[in-house]
Image (tube, rainbow, N blue to C red):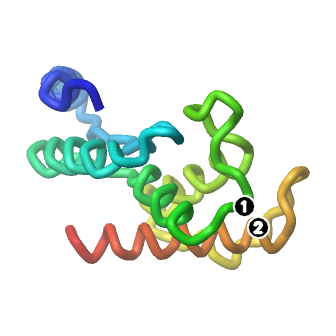
Amino acid sequence: MKNAERVAENVRLFDGWMEATGARAALYLTWARKHEPQNQPLITAAYTSIAKELGATLIPAGVAWQAFRAKHATPELYDKDGSHPTLAGSFLAACVAFEVLFGRSSAGLEIKLDGLTAEEIALLQSIAAATAKSHRSRR
């Protein structure tokens, strides 16, 4: 993360506009680039801090990616550019968003995706569920 304070300033600006319409912010905490995993704690801290300050919902997709990568090499989460997600990375992030926004576990939902095996889907769902559960317990 290049400038955490600038991110916070921009989120505050948008939060004011959203609040004026009756909406509430949801922040999508993304992942570090593949070749810069040491940046994940900085990204996580920046988004967690501004979410707490504003009372915004935090979708910790990057935290789930970090947890997955600590224990698993496949399926690959990063596309060839080392930044954008593969199908597996997008699915993991979507499961985290589902968990947080709907308050329901994605684990055990029967989903079929061309390009991911049933075992990979179940693994990604379990990581999302564990991340969301851990996130809820810290709020």
Which quarter of the image is occupied by the C terminus?
bottom left
Q: Which mark is drawn over residue 34? A: none
Secondary element at tag 2: helix
Q: Which residue is drawn at 63% across and 75% down?
A: 107
Q: Mark 2 points at which residue?
A: 120
Q: Residue at x 72, y 61 (%)?
A: 74
| Quarter holding residue 103 | bottom left
- 110 left or right of 26 in image: right
Secondary element at tag 1: loop
Q: Position of residue 69 (x, y in %)?
A: 55, 61
Q: Label 1: how many residues lie within 10 Å, few (<14), some (14-19) or many (20+)?
A: few
Front residue (pair 139, 65): 65
Please report contact status of discs 1 and 2: CB closer than 8 Å, yes or no. yes
Q: Name the residue under label 1.
A: 74
Q: Where is residue 25 in the image (x, y as percent from the top left)?
A: 28, 39
Q: Which amino acid, by three-letter code, is at mark 1?
A: Thr
Q: Label 2: how many residues lie within 10 Å, few (<14), some (14-19) or many (20+)?
A: some
Seen as rendered, the residue at the extreme right is 114
